[in-house]
Amino acid sequence: MILEPRATDLDLVEVENALLRAAVGDYSAEAAVLLLANAGHWLPQLRGAGLICLLGDVDGEGLWAQVAWPDLEAALRAGTISGTGSQLRLLRAAASLADGQPVDLGDLAAGLDRDGLALVLAAVAHAGGSHGDDLPPLAAWPAPD
């Protein structure tokens, strides 16, 4: 019996790479993954809760993965995943970018600290394709600490 790998079997770098591999070319999906990865809080929680699904090695370059976006609200209600108000806003922004889930922009902007707002601005700029021009992105991803 051959067991299929699960996201919980992977370290966080492998999970992030698998998510990005599946998202490449879809700027909104890329932005959502980068938002979650840069925020730091959500990838470990989503992986641990089984909300990251591995899709296998689609192209011979490595595993692909996706977040089970439709299952997030149920997981939040059940307490399977949790975060602060600011962290929840970042998760909902990512879900909106990747899956079209509605988000109240006024509440989102008002409830984020400066670092969170910088991440959301970078994500929206990325989703809009501003990183692909000859000009610098409208809002760059913050440099890692």
Image (cartoon, rainbow, N blue to C red):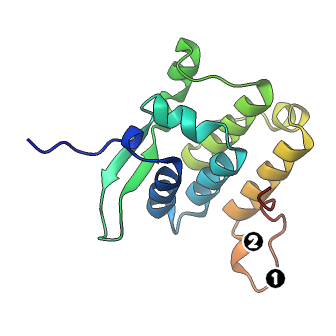
Q: Is residue 60 left or right of residue 113?
A: left
What residue lies at 53% left-to-right and 54% top-to-bottom?
Answer: 13
The residue singled out by tag 2 in the image is 130
Q: Nearer the viewer, residue 37 or 13?
A: 13
Q: Nearer the viewer, residue 52 or 27?
A: 52
Percent position (x, y) of residue 86?
79, 31
Q: Is residue 73 left or right of residue 128?
A: left
Q: Check contact, mark 2 vs mark 1: CB within 8 A.
A: yes
Pointer 2: residues within 10 angstroms few (<14), some, or many (20+)? some
The residue singled out by tag 1 in the image is 135
Distance from Cα at disc 2 to Cα at disc 1: 8 Å
Q: Is residue 47 above or below residue 27?
A: above
Looking at the rendered image, the quarter that the C terminus falls into is bottom right
Q: Is residue 66 left or right of residue 97?
A: left
What residue lies at 70% left-to-right and 51% top-to-bottom?
Answer: 38
Quick check: can you spot residue 132? yes
Circle 1: element type: loop
Percent position (x, y) of residue 100?
59, 43
Q: Quadrant of residue 45?
A: top right
Looking at the rendered image, the quarter that the N terminus falls into is top left
Residue type of the residue flagged with mark 2: Ser
What residue lies at 84% left-to-right and 64% top-to-bottom?
Answer: 139
